[in-house]
Amino acid sequence: MTATLFSPYTIKGVTLKNRIVMSPMCMYSCHNEAGKVENWHKVHYAARAVGQVGLIVVEATAVTAQGRISSRDLGIWSDEHITGLKELVSLMKEHGAKTAIQLAHAGRKAMVEGEIIAPSPLAFDEHMRVPKEMTKADIENTVQAFQQGARRAKEAGFDIIEIHAAHGYLINEFLSPLTNKRQDEYGGSAANRYRFLGEVIDAVREVWDGPLFVRISASDYHPEGLTVEDYIEYAKRMKEQGVDLIDVSSGAVIPASIDVYPGYQVRFAEQIRQGAGVATGAVGLITSGLQAEEILRNERADLVFIGRELLRNPYWPRTAAKELGVELEAPVQYKRGW
Ligand code: FNR
């Protein structure tokens, strides 16, 4: 059988050797609150490159120190972060993977000391702090921080940049009416709530002409929240601004329970792909080669993002290939035993 999962995919001049993407996953492994690449990151990400993942998306990496989920997050808020990231990129590339980084700001979900910021002064839940409502200057500075993060990502040699606009972090907080109660031009209508993301995309695009992904939460799972229909409209705007692929996740904007089952977010990736005519990535409880192949063959998404299954098994691509009857090239060192 020929498998689409193992066919190359070219996006804006970058060719992935297969459609398997390692989903961004925070490792919370930085020392001394420095946000720098450690041995853990090198071992962890390089192992998935050896495991034949086509594209590795490095975990949510904070564009400001204040925008970290925890003090152990990876950071890209200073030029001092570039060296470590460069090393990480070259390790992953050496083993045949293409590389992406997820640029992030945690907004009201930041759990670091000092002031935390968000579009509106509403806490996520009773255990979290109330953020400060962002001023125009805060907004401008944060947009600039995303741009500087993109510039540093480029200097580090990443092939692709992904903007984190999902899971109830800062950008998502602007998009959703549940978390954005602003009275100015950044709140109210859908167009106004999109303004912050729009500015971030434009700012990133000024310094980055490579492939650009945006991760979204396609449903707030709340009657007054955003739905996939809203995100089809947002996806059209993103496409117009030069976003190449929407990485379609869901939830975590507010504390809502989600009915989780195999491929539970795939329908969103499919609806956005069809509704907005934009490439999408599917993610969420995709654990087998057959399941991944089904998604691609039925044109429900262009890439398949694998999270936890790649934590359990760094050689998941090999497992999936066997399942699909595909001969997968082994790293030369492993040829005799593959
Ligand atoms: C995650 N997830 C996540 N998502 C994201 O956009 N940025 C991130 O940094 C993280 N961090 C993270 C850490 C860990 C340990 C896990 C398990 C998950 C979500 C992840 O990328 C993925 O979307 C979900 O795990 C669902 O996919 P799987 O795991 O069912 O394949």
Image: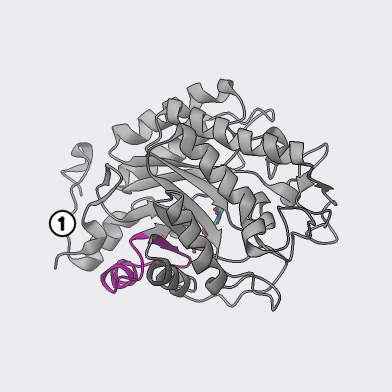
Q: Quadrant of residue 302?
A: bottom left
> Which residue occupies the foreground of this view, 140 or 173?
140
Query: Is 260 in front, or is 311?
Result: 260
Please report the bounds of the magenta region as a residue range. 280-303
Residue at left 74%, top 59%? 180
- Residue type (three-letter) at the residue carrying disc 1: Glu
Query: What residue is shown at x 63% (from left), y 39% (from top)?
Result: 143
Q: Is residue 209 magenta?
A: no
Residue that carries the numbered disc 1 in the rendered image? 327
The foreground one among 241 and 85 is 241
Q: Secondary structure at mark 1?
A: loop
Ligand 1 within 8 Å, label 1 CB: no
Quarter of the rendering containing residue 64: top right
Q: Position of residue 40 (x, y in %)?
A: 51, 35
Answer above or below: position of 255 versus 90: below
Q: Is residue 325 left or right of residue 220?
A: left
Residue 309 position in % (x across, y down): 44, 59
Tell me if residue 34 comes above or below residue 288 in the rendering: above
Residue 52 x %, y %: 29, 47
**Measured from the top left, where is residue 322 in percent x and y?**
22, 62
